[in-house]
Amino acid sequence: MNKRIIFFCIAFIGLGCLYAQERIESVPFGDMEQWAVRYIKESRIIGGKTRVLYAISPTDTIRKNEAFVYGKQGCPWTVSSAYARVAGIDKASGSVRPDKHGNGLCCRLDSKMDSVIAMGIIRLKVLVSGTIFTGKTLEPVTKEGADDPYSVVDMGVPFTGRPTTMMLDYKARVEDSDELISAKAVSRPTKLKGRDAAEMFILLQKRWEDADGNLHALRVGTGYERVYNSIGWQHDHRIPIYYGSQLIQQSGYQDYMGIGKHVFKARNSKGKMVLINEEGFSNDAPTHMIIICSSGCHEAFVGHAGNTLWVDNIRLVYAQ
């Protein structure tokens, strides 16, 4: 037998043995095949249109202006699309929806400008990035939540595993531009220097609450990737998870991956939304998992309209 053929046979067998030592588990509802469809009737003062919102959830159709209950049947996902009620005005904003992928569905995340039009005049403009999180959004969103979206997201879900990798299918369309838009509704949109990127990451945290109700956390695991250029479907894409301070020793480490770079909040035992104070690294067992996939990588209301990220089949890989 040709030596080259023998080499490839051995390499193939070795690769098969390596993967045979892994266990792959789907994140619940991470196959993106089940969705709830919501029909929200906006207030007449802003046009009175019926908007369609989608949530990753057990299949359902809802035709009421009501808060959506996240977490049904163990679904860990929440989405950036939301129903808001501010000063008695009902408004819906949608940046997440199902799309076709192969013979099934995937999740499509869009960065786009959203406007509030009253009496035929555009009153407010915001830039929204399509995002899915593990956690729960607290609806209806009020003025406080409109100003600070993370104040209404109970971020993360209980989790105690130690996966080696997050695996998923994804595709991205990323605008080739060195200019960002900051559109935060409180003022006219402004242009900023910088590039936007789609991002996908997983954070494993060990959390605890002190006597005053403050939430503390140590970073146990980190898997992080940003996508700066358009790319077609990447199947079974792997994002390695680094444990403890091992993260900062990696050649691809960037400051935005580090401790305290994300302003996340969660409910404490008293039911109050408080900041999760991330204070350092740990090799202990995690208590919570945060997964985020987004069409943008900047703070809320800053990015590039036109970016789109498609994700599907989100899984966790474990060593046997």
Image (tube, rainbow, N blue to C red):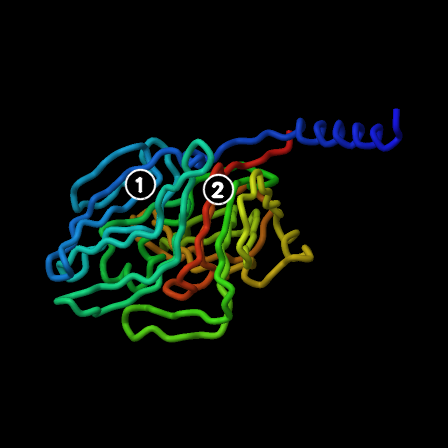
Q: Amino acid at mark 2?
A: Thr
**In which quadrant will I find the N terminus?**
top right
**Residue positioned 56% across, 43% down in the render:** 234
Residue found at the far left of this picture: 44
Q: Which residue is mark 2?
A: 287
Observer-nearest of 120 and 116: 120
Q: Which residue is mark 1?
A: 70
SS for callout 1: loop
Residue 294 location, x and y as percent? 44, 53
Observer-nearest of 306 and 132: 306
Which quadrant of the view contains residue 180? bottom left
Residue found at the far top of this picture: 1
Q: CA distance from mark 2 to mark 1?
A: 20 Å
Which quadrant of the view contains residue 116? bottom left
Residue 279 location, x and y as percent? 52, 58
Q: Residues within 10 Å of mark 1 (few under 14, many from 20)?
A: many
Image side of residue 312 versus residue 112, left or right: right
Image side of residue 287 versus residue 130, left or right: right
**Residue positioned 13% across, 59% down in the render:** 88
SS for callout 2: loop
Frontmost of labels 2 and 1 is 1
Residue 199 location, x and y as percent? 50, 54
Q: Residues within 10 Å of mark 2 (few under 14, many from 20)?
A: some
Q: How many marks?
A: 2
Q: Which numbered disc flags the more N-terminal residue, 2 or 1?
A: 1
**Residue positioned 37% across, 75% down in the render:** 190
Observer-nearest of 270 and 288: 288
**In which quadrant will I find the C terminus?**
top right
Q: Amino acid at mark 1?
A: Tyr
